[in-house]
């Protein structure tokens, strides 16, 4: 059987997950409220320990962290918050994921909230002047952007955007899903109001997310009304998933330097291996200190061809939509976003290159 290779770690994670010590959760039952009996109290301790551990990794208070059960529920939380805060405009990007884009359009129609789409230049560099102008024109805006542009791997200037938001009383929410696996996130230093994180992207179990909400956003009483269901906070029904998230984050912290070195070396190895295929294959990335270490975009001749062929060879890759403004001049080509995880190896890169060589002949 052919070896399965996953170079689409932006959207999916491979099967290597943290293993759960069963003895820790042998008396934890899904859906059990924080009741006065032993099991309920024990469940509460498991959840609060996980919350504190994950919050510590991003330099937040435990009380600023909420769990959600799905991506849709996570976005619904942000829209509920936007409604509560009286937001009149949401500033975001067309490079956000498809689920968010569908939901934000529906929210805009239902609530009468305007949407402003941030412009990007080559390699996903945000037009900060246009962003600043729209924030000045808005009574109360919510800026929702991904920490890393998935079309280029380029990190957005978070601190500059946070200062703009602070000057105009706008709220700033950051999607850290794709940056958390490769860099340390410090929500206090970046001065953001909200952020979201995914368990699956750090190789924990899928089906659980963490949302950071700065304690200045909402009072304790309003928090109770919005996010507490009976005796249980939202998103806390499945203890196994939450515990997996905690263990994955702990593993991430303990291996961070080793993982960074591995990803940096693997990325360079990939680039060196693909270089001989120029000019048929072009490498599109802006390599500097604001580029994440686990992603490369390459352009290939022709369109509507490559994803199927790589899939046949058991190689998972992500094809970027070329109508996006970041690479709008390459509509006649296929853009592959190659994203690595700590589990990828140079052997997998060699296999990818051999398949590429065969397909280009």
Image: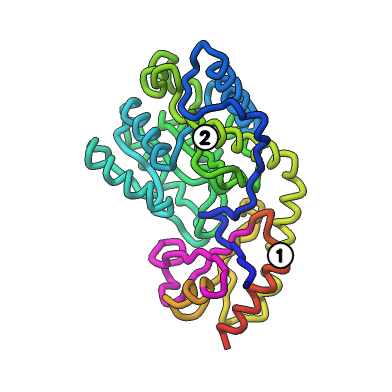
Residue drawn at (48%, 66%) of the image: 319
Q: Is residue 168 left or right of residue 178?
A: left
Which quadrant: the C terminus? Answer: bottom right
Question: Is 126 in front, or is 36?
Answer: 36
Based on the picture, tell me whether residue 320 belongs to the magenta stretch: yes
Based on the picture, tell me whether residue 126 belongs to the magenta stretch: no
Which quadrant: the N terminus? Answer: bottom right
Is residue 59 visible from the viewing direction of this image?
A: no
Q: Which residue is mark 1?
A: 268
Highlighted range, magenta: 312-340
Find the distance from the CA under tag 2 to the CA under tag 1.
Answer: 32 Å
Q: Is residue 41 left or right of residue 293?
A: left
Assign a secondary structure to mark 1: helix
Assign a secondary structure to mark 2: strand
Residue drawn at (51%, 38%) of the image: 208
Q: Position of residue 70 (x, y in %)?
A: 44, 40
């Amino acid at each position: 059987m052919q070896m399965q290779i996953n170079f689409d770690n932006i959207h999916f994670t491979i099967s290597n997950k943290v293993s759960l010590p069963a003895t820790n959760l042998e008396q934890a039952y899904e859906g059990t409220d924080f009741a006065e009996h032993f099991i309920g109290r024990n469940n509460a301790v498991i959840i609060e320990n996980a919350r504190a551990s994950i919050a510590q990794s991003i330099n937040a208070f435990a009380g600023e962290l909420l769990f959600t059960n799905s991506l849709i529920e996570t976005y619904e939380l942000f829209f509920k918050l936007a409604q509560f805060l009286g937001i009149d405009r949401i500033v975001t990007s067309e490079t956000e994921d498809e689920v968010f884009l569908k939901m934000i359009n529906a929210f805009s129609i239902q609530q009468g909230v305007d949407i402003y789409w941030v412009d990007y230049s080559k390699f996903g560099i945000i037009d900060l002047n246009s962003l600043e102008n729209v924030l000045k024109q808005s009574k109360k805006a919510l800026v929702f952007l991904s920490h890393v542009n998935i079309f280029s791997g380029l990190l957005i200037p978070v601190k500059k955007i946070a200062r703009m938001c602070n000057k105009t009383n706008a709220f700033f929410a950051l999607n850290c899903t794709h940056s958390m696996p490769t860099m340390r996130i410090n929500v206090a230093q970046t001065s953001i109001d909200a952020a979201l994180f995914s368990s699956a992207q750090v190789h924990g179990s899928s089906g659980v997310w963490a949302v950071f909400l700065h304690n200045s956003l909402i009072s304790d009483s309003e928090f109770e009304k919005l996010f507490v269901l009976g005796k249980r906070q939202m998103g806390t029904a499945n203890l196994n998933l939450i515990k997996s998230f905690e263990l994955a984050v702990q593993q991430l912290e303990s291996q961070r330097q080793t993982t960074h070195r591995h990803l940096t070396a693997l990325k360079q190895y990939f680039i060196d291996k693909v270089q001989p295929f120029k000019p048929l294959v072009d490498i599109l990335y802006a390599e500097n200190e604001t580029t994440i270490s686990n992603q490369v975009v390459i352009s290939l001749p022709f369109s509507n061809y490559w994803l199927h062929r790589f899939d046949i060879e058991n190689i998972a890759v992500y094809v970027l939509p070329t109508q996006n403004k970041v690479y709008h001049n390459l509509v006649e080509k296929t853009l592959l976003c190659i994203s690595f995880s700590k589990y990828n190896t140079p052997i997998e890169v060699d296999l990818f290159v051999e398949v590429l060589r065969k397909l280009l002949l």
